Image (cartoon, rainbow, N blue to C red):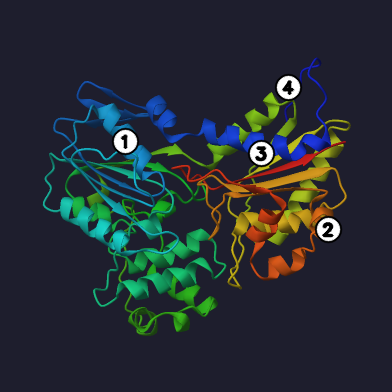
Amino acid sequence: MASRTASLSAPPITYRQGKEIAQGIFLETLAAIEVRHAMLARIRREGETLLAGNISAPLSRPPRVVALGKAANRMAATLDEILGGQVEAGIVVSPAEPPHKLERYRYFLGGHPYPSLGSWQGAEAALAMLDRLTADDLVIYLISGGGSALFEKPLDPTVGLADLIELNRRLVGCGLPIEQINVLRKHLSAVKGGRLALQAYPARQLTIFISDVPEQFPSMVASGPTMADESTVGQCYEIAEERSLAAELPASLRKHFAQRTLVETPKPGDKRFRRSQYYCLLSNRDALEAAQHAAQNMGLTSEVDMGDWDRDFRLVVEESLAHLESLAAAYPGQVVCLVQGGEVISPVTAPGTGGRNQAFALYAAQRIAGQKRVVLSAGTDGRDGNSPTSGAVADGQTISRAAVLGLDPARYLAECDSYHFFCSLGDTLDTGFTDNNVRDVRLWLHFA
């Protein structure tokens, strides 16, 4: 629901400030969901007990820690701070080197969006560290988005790294929503779909995770290495057949679809998960609420739209514009801000540079050309697709400015090269890696 907090004494907000305002809202959003701040606010140690929200875990002996994903470095460092350095051993698999390495931890540089040798080595190291644990042991998992690529080992030992990379290349570019992609990943992996947790059984296990998936699919974060899996091999076969994916896979993987030999993952109700607990530290909802709060503080009438936006980016643009029209009509004469999240789908059909956020902004720029409107779309992880930026911002003058430079938006969209379009205009959002990932944030501003 929209809310208004504009001060009567505040200077009027003008369309000329639009892109700057949108970028300011996004940067304030990133600051509000900073990982260390969230962990220190929501996780604490009291004597020999670790408290995460309403969950408690005994610390009768130092725990083992597995941190994986885009926020792994920051989460591991903050947990170590909370625990006072009392950790038995730890594994960290992330896309970047940490500023400082913790004692008793081993670090691996994983690949993203495709697995690398470091992804494989990190998974093997974690499996080895969790081997032969007892019921008196505690394992703490720190899991965040990107873990599906950053942390991986195939279940079939005949599958090599090159095949694993090709599998992920096909999945990332095929246009499937993330939950369907991860159904396939789970059933081909030795560490996804709950299989990492099985390695640590019968130890007590606590998973603290940052969600980069729809709220109703928590076991899809990093393809659910510690959670029982609701999906089935039957779904895998159906998804592969609907998209004709199997024929495009390497032979070592294709055979499992042709011969129906995929191995089922552990399911809800499996007794080996009875001593496992889960705490969601941050999600897309936190980012959207932070964005709305930032917009209100800037004097905008704002509304969060929690719709299902994991669909084709063109359809989402059209539906978003209809919602923006309604919001503007409800608050005539006011500057309104529509806040959305999720991850739109933008199939990769050409070898350009960019991602779903910049494709979204480029298509939207054409739809708001000549209007007093602004659109921003960006990833909270600081990276959009294969580009070095988090997203882009556009307004009603973007297309006319591009025309002066001879930039054809339709061509850039067709070539999946939205990054170079916005880079030429100076309208990319260059935040750098944020050590976080709670999906995307999209902002629509309408000026009366």
**x, y percentage for residue 408?**
77, 65
Q: Examine the rendering and report whether any part of residue 211 can be seen.
A: yes
* 4 or 3: mark nearer the eye: 3
From the image, tell me which residue sits under label 2.
Answer: 404
For the residues labelled 4 and 3, say whether their Cβ atoms are less than 8 Å apart: no
Q: CA distance from mark 4 to mark 2?
A: 39 Å
From the image, tell me which residue sits under label 3.
Answer: 23
Residue depicted at x 31% and y 56%: 194
Q: CA distance from mark 2 to mark 3?
A: 24 Å
**x, y percentage for residue 282?**
46, 38
* 4 or 2: mark nearer the eye: 2
Image disc number at residue 5:
4
- Identify which amino acid the numbered label 4 is placed on: Thr
- Identify which amino acid the numbered label 2 is placed on: Val
Graded by Cα atoms within 10 Å as few (under 14), some (14 to 19) or many (20 or more), the crowding at tag 3 reads: many
Tell me which corner region of the image, top left, top right, bottom left or bottom right, holds residue 61.
Answer: top left
Q: CA distance from mark 3 to mark 1?
A: 29 Å
For the residues labelled 2 and 3, say whether their Cβ atoms are less than 8 Å apart: no
For the residues labelled 3 and 1, say whether their Cβ atoms are less than 8 Å apart: no
Image quadrant occupied by the N terminus: top right
Tell me which corner region of the image, top left, top right, bottom left or bottom right, holds residue 286.
Answer: top right
- Identify which amino acid the numbered label 3 is placed on: Gln
In the depicted view, which residue is nearer to us: 103 or 367? 103
Residue 291, relative to residue 229: is it above or below?
above
Tell me which corner region of the image, top left, top right, bottom left or bottom right, holds residue 98.
Answer: top left
Graded by Cα atoms within 10 Å as few (under 14), some (14 to 19) or many (20 or more), the crowding at tag 4 reads: some
From the image, tell me which residue sits under label 1.
Answer: 77
Secondary structure at badge 3 equals: helix
